Image: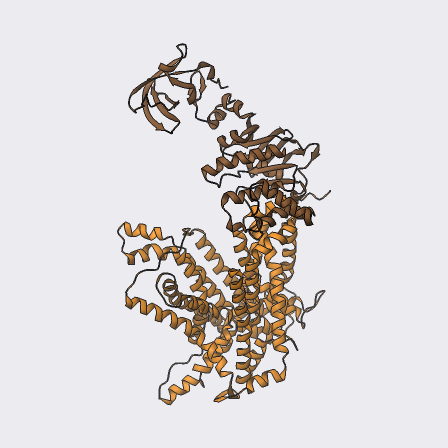
Chain colours: A brown, B orange
């Protein structure tokens, strides 16, 4: 298939630089995620690739072919939208066939490919249904089938799971990532949910204020954030004088190796989340430290009591 | 490629360019000519303000201004007073036969108001049936000619303009706001006055404004009922017909004043409403209130009385058209003579009406729907300007636009006077705002990502418009088409200025019959017109119901 090259891409809306000199290379068949808070420019960048937003400067290439001046309908892209964007005036099969008909696929070939795509998203037999008869999860499957069936060079996902409930989100993201891997289509995925990004991506580009904050594999960004913003956006972070420390790098002092540095304080708040228990601990100097411990019925945590913690010095990230 | 217009803007730009060209030629250019006629001397050569001094210097025309405004304000007040309780009853009280009431209440909007005015004359005029019957009992009552009668007819025919938006307003009130007020200790009555009504006021005002503007522009009702009382639209018409100089300067002055008044009212309303948006985003309509039998009966009687009273004149016209007329005098014998005379003379007026209405409805759809697309989908100065220009015909009386057409297309490179096309164009331009409004209302509900999905799947923006947007908008486009058709069929104010020779319409036949005292032909034409307007509405109703069932 195709790799994507983004070079010095810039776009302003009024005085706001929505995308500010972004350069990226997405590998052939890679699942690449644009992650960041709302307004960071991730959606604008995706819409530039799709052809719904002009570039002020820079260029975008699929392989060696420059595409940023091409009309959107000639770019050969499969796009999945946040609100599904399933055509309400067409049946499920009509929706999936839409892009094929635009490519002048007809007859038995058309029917065969539609059935195949529906089977791929586990909607075999749903072809004659109308969109209003489907649930949100099923609608998003139709949207995915519709984007896949045209065998696009590039798949774009614009927060495809944010309208689904939490449980469905988790199962759908696994499905999306499996489908992408099995078809080997280069995919760019936009989300503001760092857990979702880490679960599906080969690599993540973390964005802030129109710029790239850090690009890397999920584990790399999580464990070695390049900035305070990256550290905090990727998960709860304790900012100690030594550097940033994830809550799960802390343990009760009684369970920790003797050489680990100790922190003593009082428990301010206890959050029992099932497998883990979260603690907010106020240290003697007033610093608030957050710890995440595996559930242990033998050691009940009670707010107000004193606690001694220790942390793994190897897991402290020094921020610039 | 040397063209540097970004590809996603090409379709909207192309549509906007065509829209500007069409509205520029057939709206702005004629209006400009009306304006320049008003500031040029009789020969159309020198700039002068003398026309304004001349027209406004005469008490007769000053009277026309004052009368028109007074009648407009009075009719706005009476329609509002009548419609707000009506709307409240329909949306919040248990009233039997609500669906029927709502369907009947919308009918005066499509029926020609001057027919209602004429019916009032036949019933309550000097030689009216009721008048004579009452006189035979020795009872007299005041004249229905003049301001009182005009306000009465406006109230009966224009009240749906207030009723319908106000009803929608009452239904959009989030009931939790009322519940909040009551939990804070406010009685239901106080809640109505301090919470519910204030939320609905923008809807009431929007409706009232429509009524006011309709009264300013209306030609037919004052023509039938005003007698010696000077009224704007009628006097502009008379001045124009009477002016012999090549430059219709006096008619131009009245036209300009009429446009300025409407524009001023629209601006005031925009300013007022821009700071008051109380949409509460109700998920479901508020519940029907539990009330005592007294209120229940009173509400039912009130609603049914108003809705039927407004339709009595139309019903009366249909009945009267089957009676014998000798000149303007009515005799209570059944007769088909009126229709025989009407259609013996010629069936052309009926055919013309059908033809013009169809062509104009097609024109309005072709112009209005694409403009609505640009106005809703593009955020730019260009789109806002197009929006304002496409709304402008709403503020222009038919008489004034028609005068502009005659001045503009009477000579030069584009001569249209004397043919049917000029009428169709005038109708099209006049109804464009309605098509733009109704289409953009639907477009606002269609998520733009549907279009993007279609484009990313390989359909060009134009194909996407045809394959996705048009099917999704079809219901709205169809209702817009029928509404245009129906209102064009009963159009009078532009028609009387523009018709010529064999291109008379039913409304012109009625107009001429009234002028010459031919009551029989007038009633026959009027009831034919009623049938012509109600048939497509009935068809549309059936079509929509079948569409919804499938």
Could you say which is closer to the camera, residue B63 or residue B268?
B268
Please identify the residue farthest to the top as the structure is shown: A259
Image position of A293 (left or right of A60)? left
Could you say which is closer to the camera, residue B390 or residue B523?
B523
Asked if one can make out residue A269 in the rendered structure from this viewpoint, the answer is: yes
Vertical order, A22 against B483 (above or below): above
* Residue B140 placement: quadrant: bottom left
Asked if one can make out residue A185 in the rendered structure from this viewpoint, the answer is: no
Image position of B133 (left or right of A196)? left
Q: Position of residue A211 (x, y in %)?
A: 56, 30
Vertical order, B289 against B349 (above or below): above
Could you say which is closer to the camera, residue A245 or residue B215?
A245
Residue at 55% from the left image edge and 28% from the top image edge: A204
Image position of B136 (left or right of B379)? left
Image position of B86 (left or right of A130)? left
| Circle count | 0
Q: Quadrant of the N terminus of chain A?
A: top right
* Residue B440 placement: quadrant: bottom right
Q: Where is residue B235 in the image (x, y as percent from the top left)?
A: 53, 73
Vertical order, B267 against B54 (above or below): above
Could you say which is closer to the camera, residue B296 or residue B274?
B296
Please identify the residue farthest to the right as the structure is shown: B1
Residue at 47% from the left image edge and 63% from the top image edge: B210
Vertical order, B223 against A108 (above or below): below
Q: Where is residue B214 in the image (x, y as percent from the top left)?
A: 49, 67
Q: Position of residue A245 (x, y in %)?
A: 44, 20
* Residue A303 placement: quadrant: top left
């Amino acid at each position: 298939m195709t790799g994507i090259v983004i070079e010095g891409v810039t776009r302003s809306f009024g005085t706001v630089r929505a995308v500010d000199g972004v350069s990226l290379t997405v590998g052939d068949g890679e699942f690449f995620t644009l992650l960041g808070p709302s307004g960071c420019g991730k959606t604008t960048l995706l819409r530039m690739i799709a052809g719904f937003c002009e570039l002020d400067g820079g260029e975008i290439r699929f392989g060696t072919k420059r595409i940023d001046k091409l009309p959107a309908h000639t770019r050969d892209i499969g796009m999945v939208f946040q609100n599904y964007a399933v055509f309400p005036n067409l049946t499920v099969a009509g929706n999936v066939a839409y892009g094929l008909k635009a490519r002048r696929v007809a007859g038995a070939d058309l029917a065969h490919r539609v059935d195949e795509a529906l089977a791929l998203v586990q909607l075999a037999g749903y072809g004659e249904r109308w969109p209003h008869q489907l649930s949100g999860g099923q609608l998003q499957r139709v949207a995915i089938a519709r984007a896949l069936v045209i065998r696009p060079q590039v798949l774009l996902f614009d927060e495809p799971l944010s309208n689904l409930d939490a449980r469905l989100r988790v199962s759908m993201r696994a499905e999306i990532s499996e489908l992408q891997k099995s078809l080997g289509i280069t995919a760019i995925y936009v989300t503001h949910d760092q857990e979702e990004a880490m679960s599906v991506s080969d690599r993540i580009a973390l964005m802030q204020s129109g710029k790239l904050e850090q690009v890397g594999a999920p584990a790399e960004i999580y464990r070695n954030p390049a900035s305070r913003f990256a550290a905090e956006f990727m998960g709860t972070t304790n900012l100690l004088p030594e550097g940033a420390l994830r809550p799960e790098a802390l343990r009760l002092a009684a369970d920790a190796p003797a050489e680990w540095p100790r922190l003593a304080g009082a428990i301010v708040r206890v959050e029992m989340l099932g497998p883990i228990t979260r603690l907010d601990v106020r240290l003697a100097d007033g610093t608030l430290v957050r710890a995440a411990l595996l559930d242990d019925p033998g050691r009940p945590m009670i707010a107000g009591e004193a606690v001694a913690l220790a942390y793994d010095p190897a897991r402290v990230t020094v921020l610039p | 490629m040397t063209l540097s217009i970004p590809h996603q803007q090409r379709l909207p730009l192309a549509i906007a360019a065509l829209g500007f060209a069409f509205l520029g030629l057939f709206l702005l250019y004629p209006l400009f000519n009306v304006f320049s006629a008003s500031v040029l001397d009789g020969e159309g050569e020198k700039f002068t303000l003398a026309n304004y001094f001349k027209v406004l210097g005469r008490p007769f025309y000053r009277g026309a201004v004052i009368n028109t405004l007074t009648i407009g304000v009075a009719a706005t007040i009476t329609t509002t007073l009548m419609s707000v309780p009506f709307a409240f009853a329909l949306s919040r009280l248990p009233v039997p036969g609500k669906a029927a009431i709502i369907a009947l209440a919308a009918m005066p909007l499509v029926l020609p108001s001057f027919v209602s005015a004429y019916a009032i004359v036949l019933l309550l005029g000097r030689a009216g049936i009721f008048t004579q019957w009452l006189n035979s009992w020795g009872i007299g009552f005041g004249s229905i000619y003049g301001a009182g009668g005009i306000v009465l007819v406006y109230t009966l025919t224009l009240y749906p303009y207030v009723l319908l938006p106000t009803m929608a307003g009452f239904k959009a009130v989030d009931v939790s706001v009322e519940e909040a007020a009551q939990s804070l200790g406010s009685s239901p009555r106080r809640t109505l006055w301090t919470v519910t009504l204030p939320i609905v006021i923008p809807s009431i005002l929007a409706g009232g404004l429509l009524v006011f503007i309709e009264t300013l522009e209306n030609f037919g009702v004052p023509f039938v009922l005003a007698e010696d009382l000077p009224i704007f639209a009628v006097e502009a018409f008379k001045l124009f017909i009477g002016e012999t100089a090549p430059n219709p300067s006096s008619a131009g002055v009245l036209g300009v004043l009429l446009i300025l008044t409407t524009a001023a009212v629209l601006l005031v309303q925009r300013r007022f409403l821009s700071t008051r948006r109380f949409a509460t985003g109700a998920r479901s309509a508020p519940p029907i209130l539990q009330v005592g039998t007294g209120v229940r009966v009173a509400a039912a009687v009130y609603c049914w009385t108003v809705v039927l009273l407004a339709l009595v004149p139309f019903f009366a016209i249909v009945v009267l058209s089957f009676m014998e007329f000798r000149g303007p005098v009515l005799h209570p014998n059944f007769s088909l003579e009126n229709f025989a005379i009407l259609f013996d003379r010629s069936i052309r007026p009926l055919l013309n009406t059908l033809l013009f209405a169809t062509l104009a409805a097609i024109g309005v759809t072709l112009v209005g729907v694409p403009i609505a697309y640009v106005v809703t989908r593009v955020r730019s100065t260009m789109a806002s300007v197009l929006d304002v220009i496409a709304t402008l015909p709403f503020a222009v009386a038919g008489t004034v636009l028609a005068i502009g057409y005659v001045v503009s297309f009477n000579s030069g490179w584009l001569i249209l006077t004397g043919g049917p096309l000029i009428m169709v164009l005038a109708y099209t331009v006049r109804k464009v705002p309605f098509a733009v409004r109704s289409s953009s209302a639907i477009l606002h509900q269609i998520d733009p990502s549907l279009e993007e999905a279609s484009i990313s799947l390989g359909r060009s923006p134009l194909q996407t418009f045809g394959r996705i947007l048009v099917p999704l908008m079809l219901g709205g486009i169809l209702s817009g088409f029928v509404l245009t058709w129906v209102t064009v069929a009963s159009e009078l104010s532009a028609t009387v200025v523009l018709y010529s020779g064999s291109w008379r319409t039913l409304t012109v036949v009625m107009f001429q019959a009234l002028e010459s005292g031919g009551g029989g032909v007038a009633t026959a034409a009027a009831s034919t017109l009623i049938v012509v307007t109600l048939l497509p509405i009935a068809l549309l109703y059936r079509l929509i119901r079948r569409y919804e069932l499938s």
